[in-house]
Image: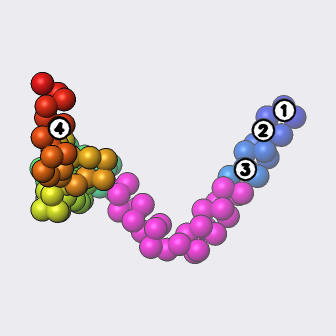
């Protein structure tokens, strides 16, 4: 019987510590607490597999792809405009095109 009473007291202490911890975090970050409560209610209400969730996920994926791909494409377009193509066959290490006899000697050496 003493073991049961000790177990109840131990559980009561842990619950009290948990409660004070949650209250401290809620008072420190009320916006985050409200967002977590809204998200939990949305999920528990069956919103995970709803059309709204599908639209939100699709929008997030599109936005992430745009943020990842657009800088890559603009850098590629900028490089092409500057004449720095990724694989220029008659360019030296500096990225400049060889002209005149240097380009002819390079093409003769590869034949």
Q: Nearer the viewer, residue 36 or 104?
A: 104
Q: Which residue is under mark 1? A: 3
Q: CA distance from mark 1 to mark 3?
A: 16 Å
Report if the CB atoms under discs 1 and 3 are less than 8 Å apart.
Answer: no
In the picture, the disc for residue 7 is 2
Q: Which residues are magenta?
A: 16-41
Question: Residue 97 in the image: x percent, y percent?
Answer: 17, 52
Task: Name the residue located 59 percent from the left edge and 67 percent from the top edge.
Answer: 25
Farthest-out residue, front: 101
In the picture, the disc for residue 14 is 3
In the rendered structure, the answer to whether residue 64 lies left or right of residue 15 reads left
Task: Name the residue located 73 percent from the left edge and 45 percent from the top edge.
Answer: 11
Report if the CB atoms under discs 2 and 3 are less than 8 Å apart.
Answer: no
Q: Which residue is under mark 4? A: 105
Question: Residue 43 in the image: x percent, y percent?
Answer: 31, 50
Q: Nearer the viewer, mark 4 or mark 3?
A: 4
Q: Disc 4 on helix, strand or loop? A: helix
Q: Residues within 10 Å of mark 1 (few under 14, many from 20)?
A: few
Q: Nearer the viewer, residue 45 or 59?
A: 59
Q: Nearer the viewer, mark 1 or mark 4?
A: 4
The magenta stretch spans residue 7: no
Q: Disc 1 on helix, strand or loop? A: helix
Residue 106 in view: yes
């Amino acid at each position: 019987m003493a073991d049961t009473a000790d177990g109840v007291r131990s559980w009561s202490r842990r619950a009290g510590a948990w409660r004070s911890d949650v209250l401290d975090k809620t008072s420190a970050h009320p916006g985050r607490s409200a967002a977590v409560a809204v998200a939990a209610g949305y999920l528990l209400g069956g919103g995970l597999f709803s059309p709204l969730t599908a639209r939100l996920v699709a929008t997030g994926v599109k936005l992430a792809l745009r943020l990842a791909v657009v800088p890559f494409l603009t850098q590629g377009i900028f490089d092409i405009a500057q004449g720095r193509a990724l694989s220029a066959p008659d360019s030296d290490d500096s990225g400049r095109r060889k002209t005149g006899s240097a380009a002819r000697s390079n093409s003769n050496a590869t034949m």
